[in-house]
Image (cartoon, helix red, strand yellow):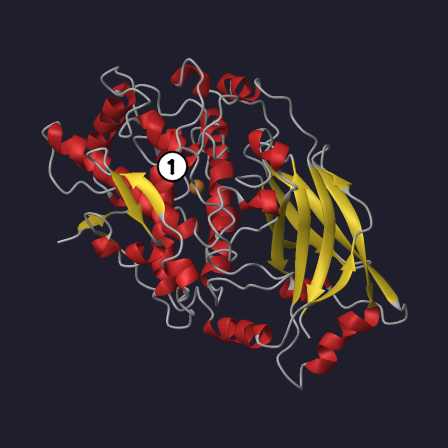
Amino acid sequence: MPRVRRSVWQLSNPSPELEWYARAVAEMRRRPFQDPTSWAFQGAVHGYSQNRAPWPSLVSPPRPNFPDWERCQHQTWFFLPWHRGYLAAFEAIVASIVEALGGPGEWALPYWNYSDGSANARRMPRGFTGRRRPDGSNNPLWSPRRPNFDNDFNYQIPAGIVDTGPALSTPRFTSGRTGVPPGFGGPETGSVHFGAASGFANGELESQPHNLVHDAIGGLMGDPNTAGLDPIFWLHHANVDRLWQVWVEQPAAAGNPNTPMWLNNVAFSLYDASGMQWTFTSSDVLDTRTVLHGYEYDDQAPAAPAAIALEAIETAMAAEGSGEPELIGASTTGISLVSGSARTTVRIDAATLGARDLLESVGPPPRTYLNIENVTGLGVGTIYRVLVRSPGGEPVHTGYLSAFGSFGRGDLGDQAGGGNSAFDVTEALARAGNVAAESPQVDLEVLFEQELPPTEEEAPEAASLEAIEPAREPRIGRVSLYQTR
Ligand SMILES: [Cu+2]
């Protein structure tokens, strides 16, 4: 029987699952960083930087990386399979420690479903808040650097950020086309630690809710080089992994890639519970019941019909089949976000926008995509709301720009030409209103407004996290619009 991963907010209170997790985390923290089953080693497999707290206190004296450190896959179609293997290996390590400590066999990682609409869903799960436990001992599941949750015990992740609709209604795993969002799972690449360095964009699930939840938690979770050190990381990623399963099981989804390039040609190495190297490819992790010890989720049914518009998927697939998208306009200068908000204009031929209505009767309506290119230096745990406005109209929300894993500063920023982000803005433009037909050209406004971190004072621990490196100016290279014909 595969073990069962359960929803953390539906566990009993107190729950044996979290109690054993806490004890195992404490045990892993006692192990030296050179030990693959230690807390520091597991965190470093995802990301590591001697320039980021708390690494200098965990890895001392500073030394070059182990070859197996800094392996996490982002802005690539290996994001989902790599993290699935990473979670399974971590779960195996925790489970074996739980057993060794006298706990039950078959311990499984709970998942944090922040999107199910229940009363507590968007709050930090019970057991992860509070520096001390009721008996006065240190709480191993607490992390000292979650600014939003530290400042306000009742903090909830903003609802828009945990919306899984955009990801789950994406028809294809990867798109493979310029100017178009790269699909549910991410762009076609080789093995890349951070694709943003090469200008790749996040897949839909990686963007939202994955990246945005990292940002909303902030602190260690806000930076891929420290994220694995926060115990909540693993419950967040279990939910992301579950959402992959939910997407795959939707009848209208195109399913996982079936090319050997994704299935078999790129292998990854991790460590199992005994500290032995474990090598796997995507094809090894497609059936969750056979990944290492095997697991299932207590709820991996396709989302309710109301949440997933099958017609929208069909429309999108029809539009996708209609050829390469065309660049229809772009901003002419770079954009600084240093003040927390910014705006730019993209000049477009009115005829291009108007063509939408004409073509509707002939074939699938064209779709329009907003691309945000060469983004650098956004900082740790930052989110910008992205809006569009037609002349004389009201701003319409189109999506969020996240700093996580792509546009951070420091180690990444130094090598990165900058990350890209792309949104389907067809519906947003329709809502932004029809554009005056008299003028041959239209200046469409694109606005950026900082959503996170909140403007209130940050916890002192959060401030210490920032101290090691100077901030880089947050910048966007260019904003462009592409349209299918
Ligand atoms: Cu993550």
Q: Residue at x 27, y 27 (%)?
A: 25
**Quarter of the figure with the N terminus:** bottom left
Specify whether tag 1 is near ligand 1 (CB below 8 Å): yes
Say above or below: 440 vs 402: below
Residue drawn at 18 percent across, 40 percent down: 107
The C terminus, quarter of image = bottom right
Nearer to the camera, 392 or 367: 367
Q: Is residue 116 visible?
A: no
Please tell me whether mark 1 sits on a helix, a strand or a loop.
helix
The residue that appears at 78% across and 43% down in the rendered structure is 334
Label tally: 1
Residue 62 seen from this side? yes
What amino acid type should be assigned to the residue bearing mark 1?
A: Phe
Determine whether, in the image, residue 379 is placed left or right of residue 84. right
| Residue 308 placement (x, y as % from top left) | 44, 66
Disc 1 marks which residue? Answer: 233
- Quarter-of-image position of residue 181: bottom right
| Residue drawn 40% across the image and 38% down it | 123
Can you give x and y, in whole percent of width and height, for residue 336 in the image?
Answer: 75, 37
**Where 451 sits versus 66, above or below?**
below
Identity of the residue furthest to the bottom in this view: 362
Relative to the observer, which residue lies in front, 264 or 115? Answer: 264
Q: Position of residue 51 (x, y in %)?
A: 53, 21
Q: Position of residue 410 (x, y in %)?
A: 59, 28
Horizontal side of residue 94 vs 247, given as left or right? left
Which quarter of the picture shows residue 355? bottom right
